[in-house]
Structure formats: structure tokens, C-alpha cells
Image: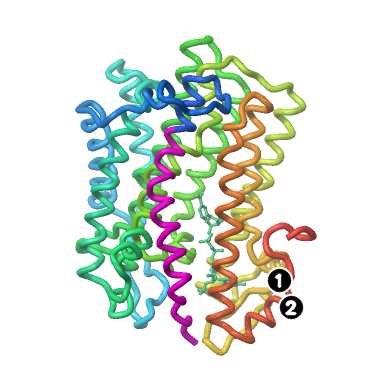
Amino acid sequence: MTNAPPSNAVRVFNMTAFVVLMAGLPFWVWYCLIAVTQYDGALVFPDAAFWSHVQMPNLEGLIFYGSWLALQAGLYHFLPGKPEEGQPLPDGSRLTYRLNGLASFLISIGLWAGLHVSGLVPGDYIYLHMPAILGTANVIVMALCFYVYFLGRSQATEEEKQMNFLEAFFLGAARNPRNGRFDWKFFCESRPGLTFWVLIALSCAVHQYKTFGTVTNAMMLICFSIFLYIVDYYIHEDAILTTWDIIHEPFGWMLCWGSLIYVPFFYPMSAVWLASHDFSLPTWAAAGIFVLGVTGYVIFRQCNIQKHRFRKDPTTKIWGKPPEFIQTKRGSKLLTSGWWGVASHANYLGDLMMSLAMGLAVWNNTLFGYGYFLAFVILLVHRDWRDDKHCADKYGDDWKAYRQKVRWHIVPGLY
Ligand code: NDP
């Protein structure tokens, strides 16, 4: 079964949304950063004085961010790594991916720590230069988006070639643009963005320590949560090969800008606020937030690994029992036990609990601490809707049977 092409009205609506998102989201990230660093995390009306804090790309930013991308690309390309085959592509072939993310991550963090300890680059350099880095990164990432657009056009399938410029630029001209074995989507989805997110948080912690002589429990909670999330990601790096992004999404502005700018610069706003505040949580609140975050992590991790292992070997036991599943006419098996029997996206629930924990760490001090969680709710509900539609189109009656068995989408009993 193939998807019916969207009507003209839907295409016009989509393209308007693409333009609005590409024009608006970079300003949104700037807005949050300026409000948090210059206005104490208050919701303010952005007048001309507000926008004067935006920094244009400069040479220092170019050297720093250019070196960062080059370091990550070099580590990805040259470090040895376990080769792993992805899921079958529509033509039945499979791409091979190089899994060396954990080593790249540890080297990157070690380098940051080494530069700090040696006194060559202070540990809070990133926090102190965030506006210059963001201004430069936006321009470099836009140039990269054009590069992957042209590369994607040259590697697109006949179906992908039907997209107009705007669709192909925003969504992606091809599913897996590659230079040789260098896979741009796989690389950008993690290395330069996720590791930078950790570095921004650590840099904020160093700044807090330098300013107040202490790292508060709120900052420790946030750094621990981000560190756990990203180290875990790299330990289970192969699990990304069975996710929606890698299997189904083309690679364009949405994923490229999203992974390189939105994730590392917008997600750590709680840590950015705490960098200049000596704020600690009462012990009971810190303990509750810790439990919330770790519970979310366990749900997220178990859920994703259950599907991943099941897709690799359908006899793998789940919660100590043989897996239950629906054998679809398309050939794939849909898991109906474990977390996939509780809700169709319990992994999103775990992710949301972790992001809420990061927001709660700043308590009622700034709404921007909750920006990651609130934006994540919108992103994941929309993603669940898209995935549900994709599965309904792909599996037809088999998806209806799955939905009859598994009623809930993300939060059992609620949604
Ligand atoms: P999933 O890993 O949930 O994968 C969805 C795909 O899995 C479906 O398209 C379908 O693919 C297959 N599938 C659906 N139901 C079943 C089933 N019952 N049994 C087996 N396979 C099934 O989607 P995502 O890629 O969206 O999420 C992966 C993780 O990434 C999540 O934890 C999410 O929270 C996280 N994430 C994090 C983001 C961030 O910014 N931090 C952003 C987005 C996601 P098929 O066609 O192969 O059947």
C-alpha cells in the first residue's frame, strides 16, 4: 500500500509552514537565550534593545564551531567502529553504519576537560561565548543544509525527485545523502549536536562553580540527566538504526538544523539559567526529581531496546517471556508485549518524564527551564500522530488489529 499524494491545498499549507518554521525557529532559539542570559529568564517583549544582543557570525565563532564540526567529522570518519547494517531500504538493500559514537564522545569530553585543566581554554568558554557560537553556527549549518540538499538531489530516487525545492530543502532531497561511507543524517543526528548539548551543560556548571564556589544540586541533577541520556545513547548507538528518523525521514533542514542547533542550544536552557544563579532545591524535591528522571530513563531505554532487539531477533525474550506480536501481511512483525503492549509510544513517555525532570530542577524560577519539555510535548505528540498515520497506511488491517490490542498512544489511561 502506498500513501496517496497530498492535495494541492495540503501542499500549500505544508510549504507555508516550512517557511514559517525556517524563518521563525532560529529567532525562537535566540529569544530564549537572550531572555535567559540577559533578562533573568523572564518572559519579555522583544524590542529593539532585546534584539541588539543577537550576535553576528565572527572569526572566533567560526574557528571554534568550524573546529568542533571538523573534530566530530574526523572522529566519525577515522576512529575504528563496529559496522552495523541498517533496516532494509525500499529497494531491499541495506546501508552499513559505523558505530564509534562512544569513543568519539569520550574523546570529546576528555579534550574539553584537558583544555580546562591545562588552562588553555576555560571550562566555561562555551557558556561565555554562546551568542557568538550560536550566531556562527546558524550560518554554517545553513550552508550545510544547502550542501546536503544538492548532494541529496544527486542521490534521490525517482519518487524523491518529485519534490519541489522547498519540500526537498526543508524535509530532505534524499533519505540517506552520503559521501562514500560518510552518512550525513546518521552523523548529524548525534555527534556534533548531542555531544555539544552535554558540553554546554558542563560549561554552565563550571561557570556556576567559578561564580558562586559551588555546583548546586539543581545543576547537578541537570548535568547528570543530560550526561546519562547521551552516554546511554552512545552505548546503545545501534538502536538508532531502527528509529523513525533513520528508517523513514529524508535528511534536510528539519533534521539538520534541528539536530545541530535546536537540540544543543535550546534544550539546556535550565542549565544556562542556573549558570548565573546560586539556586538549590530542597532535598525532598531533588530526590523526587531524581526518581522522576531515572524512572523516565528506564521506560525510555527498555522500550527502545525491546523493539530494537525484537526487530533483530524476534525470539528475544521480553520481561522474561517469549514476545507476543502480530505478523503483518507486509512481512514485519508488530510487537504487542513489553512496553509496546502498554502504549504505542511509551518511549516518548520516558523521554517526556526526563525532560520534565530537567525543567523541574529550576522549579518556578523561569518558564524557560520548561521550554524543552513543552516543546517536546508538541514535537512528540505530532510525531506520534505522523507515525500512527504511517503505520496505518503501511499495515492497513494489521495496524487496526494492533490498535485494538494497544489502545493508548503515549500515556496509558490519558492519551
Ligand atoms: P520509534 O523508535 O518509536 O519507531 C517508530 C517505528 O517503529 C514505526 O514507524 C514502525 O516502523 C515501528 N513500529 C511501530 N510500532 C511497532 C511495534 N509495535 N513493534 C515493532 N515496530 C514498531 O520512533 P522514533 O524514532 O520517533 O523514536 C525513537 C526514540 O527517539 C524515542 O525514545 C523518542 O522519544 C526519541 N526522540 C528524541 C528526540 C529528541 O530530540 N531528543 C526527537 C525524536 C525522537 P516500521 O515501518 O519499520 O514498522
Q: Which residues are magenta?
A: 1-30
Which secondary structure is most common in the magenta stretch?
A: helix
* Residue 243, image x, y percentages: 49, 64
Q: Is mark 1 within 8 Å of ligand 1?
A: no
Q: Residue at x 38, y 80 (%)?
A: 90
- x%, y% of residue 12? 42, 66
Q: Of callouts 1 and 2, which one flags the residue occurring earlier in the amino acid sequence?
A: 1
The amino acid beneath tag 1 is Lys
Q: Residue 321: which disc?
A: 1
Question: 217 or 127: which is nearer to us?
Answer: 127
Q: Quadrant of residue 185?
A: bottom left
Q: Position of residue 320 (x, y in %)?
A: 70, 66
SS label for mark 2: helix
Three-letter amino acid code at disc 2? Gln
Q: Is residue 273 left or right of residue 133?
A: right
Q: Is residue 20 magenta?
A: yes
Task: Give left or right: position of 218 versus 311.
Answer: right
Question: At 52% across and 87% down in the image, what residue appears?
Answer: 330
Marker disc for residue 404:
2
Query: Looking at the image, is 3 positioned above or below residue 34?
Result: below
* Element marked by disc 1: loop
